[in-house]
Amino acid sequence: MSERSDRKTARATADLVAREANVSRVAVSRAFNPNASLKPEKRDRILQIARELNYTPDMAARSLVTRRSHLVGMIVPDVCSPWESQEIDALTTALQAEGFATLLFKAKADLSMDQTLLTYMRGFNPDSVIAFTENVEPDVLSGFLDRAVPIYIIYDDAEEFGGKPSASLYDRLVVGQKEGIEQAVALLQGYGARRVAYLGGKPQSLANTERERIITQVLVGRGMAPPILVPGDYTYDTAYRATVGLFRVGDGADAIFASNDVGAFGAIDALRHELSLSVPGDVKIVGFDDIPQSHWKSYNLTTVRIDLPDRVRALVRLILRRLKAPDAGPLIETLSTRLVVRSTVG
Amino acid sequence: MSERSDRKTARATADLVAREANVSRVAVSRAFNPNASLKPEKRDRILQIARELNYTPDMAARSLVTRRSHLVGMIVPDVCSPWESQEIDALTTALQAEGFATLLFKAKADLSMDQTLLTYMRGFNPDSVIAFTENVEPDVLSGFLDRAVPIYIIYDDAEEFGGKPSASLYDRLVVGQKEGIEQAVALLQGYGARRVAYLGGKPQSLANTERERIITQVLVGRGMAPPILVPGDYTYDTAYRATVGLFRVGDGADAIFASNDVGAFGAIDALRHELSLSVPGDVKIVGFDDIPQSHWKSYNLTTVRIDLPDRVRALVRLILRRLKAPDAGPLIETLSTRLVVRSTVG
DNA sequence: ACGATGAATGAACACGTTTTCAATTCCAAC
DNA sequence: GTTGGAATTGAAAACGTGTTCATTCATCGT
């Protein structure tokens, strides 16, 4: 027997283990199901033999009868984004501990999920689906309603949620951004900022729209002018160019509220290396997310933190609760934000 | 019928479609298998009805008989790392186009894969497994040999590959780092560097060991002193502290070769913001990977690029070739590296 | 000693698909 | 009109597991 021929050895099955242990195949199944009734010594012997034979229950066969795939689908527009990669990492770790594997899919850049992707994903029967893309398309997603209930991450206004009626069919994690934004604006105002610009994210992103709305509301509420709206798309390069544009052809500003940290980096670099302006001396900067890069000395960004561990715990809770009660009404978890002060404001 | 009751509607099955279309269930199966023999008009009618009923073949049931799960497992130690997240993103996109979904697992921080994780993953029967963790444990991985053949990404010396005999049971992508390193050292020498430090990555990482080995070899080959070895772990913070240590308690250096780009950022920030030294004036810096952040203006890092599109194409090719010929000998793809010159050397 | 309660056990079925395989239909060529 | 071969079809048998359900076995209170 050469090494290579090992590969042809058929995978061990429950039947084989049963025969080898002189028990019925049902006993093997029970041995791997902790709360099934089986004599302890028998279970031990079966597990021992299973280990020798390198046997593991086949998830596909199991899921066929159990109606549980132990898969959690994630639809992500851009894995490279530091914030999203962080979230995927933490979520995968947490889910792995609960016995779930993550099934990763890439959405389109415009944050939409096309029918093809969804039906494809549906074939795998994920127990739950987390939509990182915020573009809600109720009729498309309705295809999922046979088993899993999708989870949406939304911002601030649970009721409006795109104004779509079928919103009541999703579970959701609501991120309240108001606290963090209020603290940020207070800080900016305290350091004498008068003219604030909002450097936008992807226009289709609900997080972006809500950030813009709340920042405007808070600024005006504190007697300041509404923000100068600078379009962006969450990327460094666009933020860089937009900032240069703001100061070269526009009137400039004495503070920039970026829609995410990466955009804030672009703004900082544009100010320092292209416009020869100082941060925070000439222009103050606030970001959003608090990704690991934000404490890097070149930026040391003051930013609105969305606490990742809290966020992950909330998501896992949503998944487990839904699995326990498939027919329950829409589940909701709420999260808050707070400002992390570093050195880009004062 | 309320909205909620829709959720209880059982998922459409091939049987239902068959009944609805007045054909046998086999015909439905054939309708979804393009190269099966079925009268075109019949296929159209079935697909039409399937669409109306929102039917998709169940992957679990299919994989049970086909012995193809259409899943590609990825074992990743740290999804947050910019380089890895980039690779996961590109790989997922490419595989999705070929009809595969990615199954993501987190390895332990020390780059090892424990038995629990592997047996767990095995249950899902991935068609292929890509090991991003470089710590080779042949006996552990042998548990996979019943169906999928794991792919290892290794560096430079295919033969040595950890010196483990069972290396011949893996497919592998070999990344040749010599070209890039030679170009980098030539550039450093050209700009007058005399004393080069190597800022290491995780000690368990084979990529790191090989980088250290080759850099030493190339330096000595060009008549320079072997590098000062500074231990690290691929992270920004460790690189920052290590660099401070190198210049505070050590003798310093006039050039730093970092084991990855993120480490280079840490070194740059330590030099500029803690040690008040200039880059590239006082110290020249070269990194490894060429991640997107490397062209950010605050760093603008000169670095050894591993071309991502090439790399992904090679990996996908490995997977498809192996699936076509499960019993073929070990498959090997080779890749090269080259220097990307920016402004941290001269 | 005796019925009663509960745990332990295995045969048969179900889950939703693909794959033989034999039977049928179709069509062109003689 | 016949005949051959190819295209088309459906019944039955897998694939590997969890779950009923009726049966056997041990245990315990009276």
Image (tube, coloured by chain):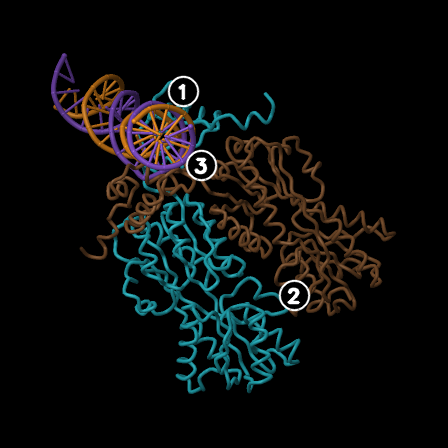
Chain colours: A cyan, B brown, C purple, D orange
Residue A205 seen from this side? yes
| Structural crowding at the residue carrying mark 1, measured as other residues with C-alpha within 10 Å and reported as few (<14), some (14–19) or many (≥20) | some
Which kind of residue does numbered mark 2 sit on?
His
**Mark 3 touches mark 1? (CB < 8 Å):** no
Q: In which quarter of the image is residue B308?
A: bottom right
Query: Rounded to the nearest whole Å, what is the CA distance between mark 2 and mark 1?
Result: 62 Å
- Marks 3, 1: nearer the viewer: 3
Q: Nearer the viewer, residue B239 or A318?
A: A318
Q: Which of A155 and A136 is in front in this view?
A: A136
Q: Mark 1 lies on which chain?
A: A
Query: Rounded to the nearest whole Å, what is the CA distance between mark 3 and mark 1?
Result: 21 Å
- Which of the two labelled residues, at mark 3 and mark 2, occupies the earlier sequence position? 3
Residue B64 seen from this side? no
Q: Quadrant of residue B275?
A: bottom right
Above or below, A267 relative to B66: below
Q: Mark 3 points at which residue?
A: B123
Q: Mark 1 points at which residue?
A: A21
Q: Nearer the viewer, residue A9 or A46?
A: A9
Q: Name the residue under label 2.
A: B295
